[in-house]
Image: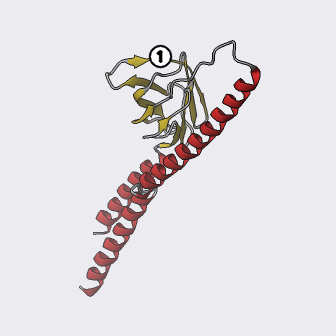
Amino acid sequence: MKKILIATLIFIFAISTNAFAHTHLESSSPEDGQVVTEELREITLNFEGKIEQGSKFELSNTQGQSMPVENISINEGKMIGSLATPLENGEYLVNWTIIGADGHPVDGEFSFTVNVSASETTPENENATTNQQNSSQDESVHEHHEQTDDNIANEQTEEKDEGKLPSYLIPVIIIVLIAIAAGVLFGFRRKK
């Protein structure tokens, strides 16, 4: 009986250590589900732990067409890729594959939408005062849109975080359940 209990505890410890060791995506820019309203030139992925060289990500549109990503750089737990040209309006999917500090490959994906409004062109013969007025109005509208987009993104992140369990919680629950099972087995053994 002791051998079974010890083997079970060793097995659970090995599983929980493995669960702790895997590196997962902590955040990204743009965020999963975000609507981007400004020209996008860079995609950033932040992971919970250090990632190794050889980690990468690919970008594609909803038709499955691959979009060129240049200069992917990796620094500790951050991976950044530059885009050769700004993305056109539409939905995009990022597929990432990393090699965690433990040497295990981990992959995942997230999506976002680009919705940049067409910029208005001003005739060259208009005077500088009109240009300044238009510029300040555009900045005011742009700031309002940024605040609204930030509020929407924060609400979406909060909604996603509400349904998401922290990565450390599952191994803790498993360990507690095993401890309870061991206590019950130990109690039955004492009664005999």
Front residue of this view, candidates 81 and 157:
157
Task: Tell which residue pokes out farthest to the bottom in this image.
Answer: 191
Task: Tell which residue pokes out farthest to the right in this image.
Answer: 128
Let me know if residue 48 appears in the view.
Answer: no
Task: Tell which residue pokes out farthest to the top in this image.
Answer: 125
Front residue of this view, candidates 145 and 15:
145
Q: Quadrant of residue 159?
A: bottom left
Crowding at dot 1, Cα within 10 Å, few <14 / some 14-19 / many 20+, comes out as: few
Q: In the image, is residue 177 above or below residue 74?
A: below
Front residue of this view, candidates 26 and 60:
60
Q: In the image, is residue 9 above or below residue 137?
A: below
Percent x, y of residue 101 = 53, 38
Q: Residue at position x 26%, y 81% from top?
A: 188
Left or right of 178, for residue 26: right
The scheme the figure's colours follow is: secondary structure
Q: Quadrant of residue 48?
A: top right
- Read off the residue under disc 1: 68
Task: Give SS at disc 1.
Answer: loop
Name the quarter where the N terminus is drawn: bottom left
Q: Residue at position x 73%, y 28% from top?
A: 132
Percent x, y of residue 138 = 63, 33
Percent x, y of residue 84 = 54, 15
Left or right of 131, for residue 98: left
